[in-house]
Image: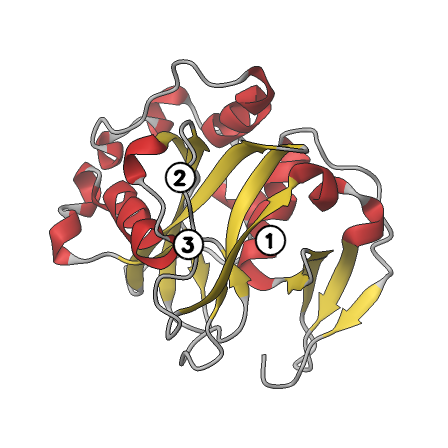
Amino acid sequence: MTRTDEETYDPGTGGLLDREGLPDWLAPVDRAARTVAPEQLSRFLPPESGAGRQSAVLVLFGDGERGPELLLMERAGSLRSHAGQPSFPGGALDPEDGDPADGGLLRAALREAEEETGLDPAGVQLFGVLPRLYIPVSGFVVTPVLGWWREPSPVGAVDPAETARVFTVPVADLTDPANRATAVHPAGHAGPAFLVASALVWGFTAGVIDRLLHFAGWERPWDTSRKVPLDWRS
C-alpha cells in the first residue's frame, strides 16, 4: 500500500514544500516520503477519535564533512516527558503556527527547531511530510517534516532547561551495522536503536530513522538479536 502524490500534497502543507534543487542523494528519501503508508512506519497511529495533541518534528538532512547527516538534539534531563532522550527538534503546535490544515504543522516544526537549536529557518528547504504517527506515552500526534539544510547555520542548546545538546550524526554511522541494536524496555516492548555520537537513540526517533533508512534503500543488514536494555525510568 502506498500514498499517491495527491494524498501527499494536500492542503495541510500550505504550499510550503519545495522539491526543486535537492541533492541527488536525497532522491530516495523524497520518493519514500511520497509513497510510504502510515502502517509501514509504525503500529502506533493517531486515534480515530481525533484525540492527541498535534505536534511536529523536523527531520533535517544536511551535507557534512562525512557526507549526508541528520540533525538531532538531546532533551534536558529535567523535562517531564522523554527526559534525556535524543530526538528530532520539534514540539506541539502553537496558535501562532496557524491552521494545521494549512501548513501550521510545517511552521511548527521550523519554529520549534529554531527555539531549541538556534538554526536559521531561512536556510531550511522543506521537501516532504511523513504520515502522522502517535506517541502513546505522551499523547502526541506527531507529523515528521522532512527538510534539506540548504544553507547550514550555527546550532547549539538555546535553553539548557529544554535542550542538553545539539549534534549531527552522519548517515554512514546510522547505517553501520556495528552501531545498531534492539532497545528493550523494562515493560517488555522493544524497538530499533542506534549507538551514535555518544548517545543511545531509541523510541520514536529511532523508529522514524529506521524506517527512513529502510524505505530509502540505505539500510544494511544488522544483528537484530543484539539487545540494549533501557533504564526503568525511560
Quarter of the rendering containing residue 229: bottom right
Q: Are marks 1 and 3 in contact (CB under 8 Å)?
A: no
Q: Nearer the viewer, mark 1 or mark 3?
A: 3
Q: CA distance from mark 2 to mark 1?
A: 27 Å
86 left or right of 6 in image: right
Quadrant, the C terminus: bottom right
- Point 78% across, 52% down: residue: 179
**Mark toward the start of the polypeptide (1 vs 3):** 3
Residue 43 visible in this rendered orientation of the protein: no
Q: Earlier in the sequence, mark 2 or mark 1?
A: 2
* Image side of residue 143 versus residue 54, left or right: right
Residue placed under numbered mark 2 in the picture: 153
Considering the numbered disc 1 on the image, is that residue within a helix, a strand or a loop? helix
Foreground residue among 110 and 42: 110
Query: Disc 1 to disc 3, how far (Cα)?
Result: 15 Å
Q: Secondary structure at mark 3?
A: loop
The answer to which image quadrant residue 13 occupies is top left
Mark 2 vs mark 1, foreground winner is 2
- Badge 3 amino acid: Pro
Q: Is residue 44 above or below residue 3?
A: below
- Residue 48 position, x and y percent, is 34, 57
Q: Horizontal and vertical percent for residue 222?
A: 84, 47
For the image, the number of numbered tags is 3
Give the image quarter of residue 53. bottom left
Nearer to us of marks 3 and 2 is: 2
| Residue labelled with disc 1 | 207
